[in-house]
Amino acid sequence: MNPVTALYGWFNDNNAYFLSSFSELEFKDSGRGSACVNLESETHIVSVCAWNHACCLDIQVMEVKSEEASYPHMGDCASIEEFKSHLEDFSARLKKESSENA
């Protein structure tokens, strides 16, 4: 498994949650060893990008109102297991925050 495949699996595994919480969602595969998931809600814009080269993962979250960005993870992962762990941690964080704001 490579990072792009892992990102696609993560997107599909969380699709029901994404559809219920975000007004726009997209999985975009460059076809050149990279892919991005883009999510938008009234309060946040989320970009999760993966590169097969160097097992790289970048996660950016921008709060729409304040225009402040946070970066829960940026850069190389030591293994595909670490890559997948960052994705799972991030989806758990999103779900926790959305349940607290409900």
Image: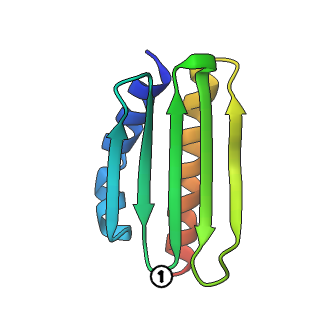
State which quadrant residue 40 falls in: bottom left
Q: Quadrant of the N terminus?
A: top left
Q: Is residue 3 above or below residue 50?
A: above
Query: Please, is residue 88 above or below residue 52 in the view?
Result: below
Q: What kind of colouring is applied to the model shown?
A: rainbow
Q: Which residue is mark 1?
A: 102
Determine the image quadrant of residue 41. Answer: bottom left
Left-right relation of 37 to 88: left
Callout 1 secondary element: loop
The residue sitting at 65% across, 76% down in the picture is 67
Q: Is residue 51 above or below residue 102?
A: above
Residue at 34% from the left image edge and 42% from the top image edge: 28
Compare residues 15 and 71 and report the one nearer the observer: 71
- Report x, y in % for residue 35: 43, 35
Looking at the image, residue 20 lies above or below residue 33? below
Looking at the image, which residue is at 33% across and 65% down? 24
Residue at 50 percent across and 72 percent down: it is 99
The three-letter amino acid code for the residue at tag 1 is Ala
User: How many numbered discs?
Assistant: 1
Given residues 90 and 29, the one toward you in this image is 29
The image position of residue 58, as x and y in percent, is 62, 41
Label 1: few (<14), some (14–19) or many (≥20) C-alpha neighbours in 10 Å: few
- Pinpoint residue 98: horizontal percent, then vertical percent: 50, 71
